[in-house]
Amino acid sequence: MKANTHPTYFDDAKIICSCGNSFTAGATVAEIHVELCNKCHPFYTGQQKFVDTASRIDKFRKKLEVAKSKPQKSKKEVTRDDSDNGPQTLREMLQALRK
């Protein structure tokens, strides 16, 4: 068996939440920083909370504002001119033969 293959295990690793709560648990790292814990998680508190470390919500809201400020493009109605030399339907070809 190889020696020194396992990482060191800390029985009293400190876990620190962004809300300020801290507790100890066993881990391979001496100190762990987390964003949510049982004191601030929406499931346990019943309050809605957005955890947005990469500011994705702000980016989405900015894109939404830009999209609302731009004028909407209207769908152009498709009209067919008689001068159009494009492909004809079978009905148009038969009517042309009868004339």
Image (cartoon, helix red, strand yellow):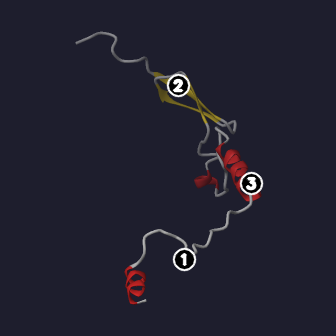
Specify few, some or many for label 2: CA neighbours under 10 Å numbering under 14, 14-19, or 20 or more.
some
Which residue lies under the disc numbered 1?
Answer: 82
Query: Residue 96: horizontal and vertical position, in percent?
Result: 42, 84
> In what element is the residue under mark 1?
loop
Quarter residue 80 falls in: bottom right
Q: Amino acid at mark 1?
A: Asp
CB atoms of marks 1 and 2 within 8 Å: no
From this viewpoint, which residue is outermost toward the top?
Answer: 3
Query: Residue 22: horizontal and vertical position, in percent?
Result: 63, 34
From this viewpoint, which residue is outermost toward the front?
Answer: 99
Which residue is drawn at the image coordinates 30% and 9% (left, top)?
3
Q: Earlier in the sequence, mark 1 or mark 2?
A: 2
Q: Nearer the viewer, mark 3 or mark 2?
A: 3
Q: Nearer the viewer, mark 3 or mark 1?
A: 1
Q: Amino acid at mark 3?
A: Glu
Quarter residue 99 falls in: bottom left
Specify few, some or many for label 3: CA neighbours under 10 Å numbering under 14, 14-19, or 20 or more.
few
From this viewpoint, which residue is outermost toward the left?
Answer: 1
Q: Earlier in the sequence, mark 3 or mark 2?
A: 2
> In what element is the residue under mark 3?
helix
Query: Residue 2: horizontal and vertical position, in percent?
Result: 26, 11
Q: Earlier in the sequence, mark 3 or mark 1?
A: 3
Q: Which mark is residue 12?
A: 2
In this rendered view, identify the residue nearer to me: 55 or 90: 90
Above or below, 50 relative to 83? above
Q: Nearer the viewer, mark 1 or mark 2?
A: 1
Above or below, 24 relative to 70? above
Q: Quadrant of the N terminus?
A: top left
Which residue lies under the disc numbered 3?
Answer: 65
Q: Amino acid at mark 2?
A: Asp
Q: Is residue 67 left or right of residue 11?
A: right
Which residue is drawn at the image coordinates 41% and 78% (left, top)?
89
